[in-house]
Image: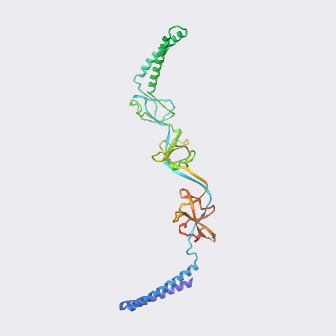
Amino acid sequence: MKSILSITFLSIMLLSCENKENTTSLESILSSGETEQINAKRIDLVAQQQILAQQIKQIDTKLSELNPDKNVPLITSFITKKEAFNHFLELQGNVTTKQNLVLTPEMPGILTQVLVLEGQKVSKGQLLATVDDGGLAQQRAQLQIQTDLAKTTYERQKRLWDQKIGSEIQFLQTKSNYQSQQELLNQINRQLAKTRITAPFSGVVDDVITEQGNVVAAGQSQIIRLVNLSDMYIEVDVPERYLKQVSKDSKVEVEFPVLGEKVDTKVRQTGSFINPANRTFKVEIGLPKTKNIIKPNLTAKLKINDYSNNSALLIPQSIISENASGEQYIYILKDKANGKATAKQVIITTGETQGDVIEVISGLNDNDEIINEGARSVKDGQVVRVMK
């Protein structure tokens, strides 16, 4: 090695000395303006250039022999192992509940009473507010008196008829009159019931929207919002291409970014209808009973487990290349010895991805050693050095 460097140094020194002389003679030749001398000088310089190129090539060849690892690429590797792989479909949904209702009156009038406060817990059937009945109570009292009289008359006439006293027409008339009065009473009772706003289910008064004393319209004026947080769920639209993968009892990871909370749950129901507008179907995801910090309309990030493989071969996506035919390939190591190995190109078929890794369906075997760092700089059959 030292002798080669000495020869190279001497050649450079001689060439430097010759260059000084040549520079002087070249200037004189060029200044002479004689074509023959200039052409002869050019031929001489070309010959010197060829000699130097040949010498440099010889030096490079010798250096390669003395340092054979100079052009061997350095790579890192890993060994494939079968492991569990779970693929998740990531979507965004909203928390909702079927028991989230704004109550409206069935009868127009003045809101005479609001009997609850915001945040108050109420039971099913409990009276929450009343609307002015417009005199229906007085009409009911009068009808009640008339109905009682008709009932007494009917019962007396029935006793006489049972004893074969009186005419049948009198009995039928008193019976018809009593039934008619009873129906009128029932009708006015139903009307009066519409002046009462009661809780359709047990829950919490979330908001008292209209205050006492306001005039309200039937079916339009919002009086009270009643919410039951004991049976909340998440509703999400899932693309139709996942119809087979997402089913009842599929595992779901739920994250509430605003709260910093995570919940593990399952799909409790899948829709049977494909929305033609966006080609999705509805999925309901149950929420276990948690703290009251989870509210309706809260945004949730969902990871639905749509594919699992307990013995998958996983590799980084970054090491995969593609040939002109569109086939994917990677490099594995063969004939490994003394820190060196041969790179072998392997065509693979890939499946699902999750994060930075991808599942290899075919082309790899368990315990294959795969080139990781440096995978894109090697060639098939090339000798590589494996870094520890």
Residue 192: x and y, percent? 44, 24
Measuring from the top left, give residue 250's x and y in whole percent. 57, 47
Residue at the extreme top of the image, as rendered: 165
Name the quarter where the C terminus is drawn. Answer: bottom right
**In the depicted structure, whether residue 83 falls above or below residue 144:** below
Number of numbered discs: 0
Name the residue nearer the viewer: 287 or 61: 61
**Front in this rendered view, residue 121 or 90:** 90
Give 13 or 350, whichever is nearer the viewer. 350
Confirm whether residue 24 shows in the render.
no
Residue 135, given in percent of the width and then of the height, sits at 40, 22
Residue 148 to residue 99: above or below? above
Which residue shows up at 36% across the image and 90% down it? 31
- Whether residue 247 can be seen here: yes
Q: How is the image coloured?
A: rainbow
User: In the rendered image, which quarter contains the N terminus?
Assistant: bottom right
Percent position (x, y) of residue 100? 48, 37
Residue at 46% x, 18% y: name it: 180
Q: Quadrant of residue 313?
A: bottom right
| In the rendered image, the vertical position of residue 135 relative to residue 307, given as above or below | above
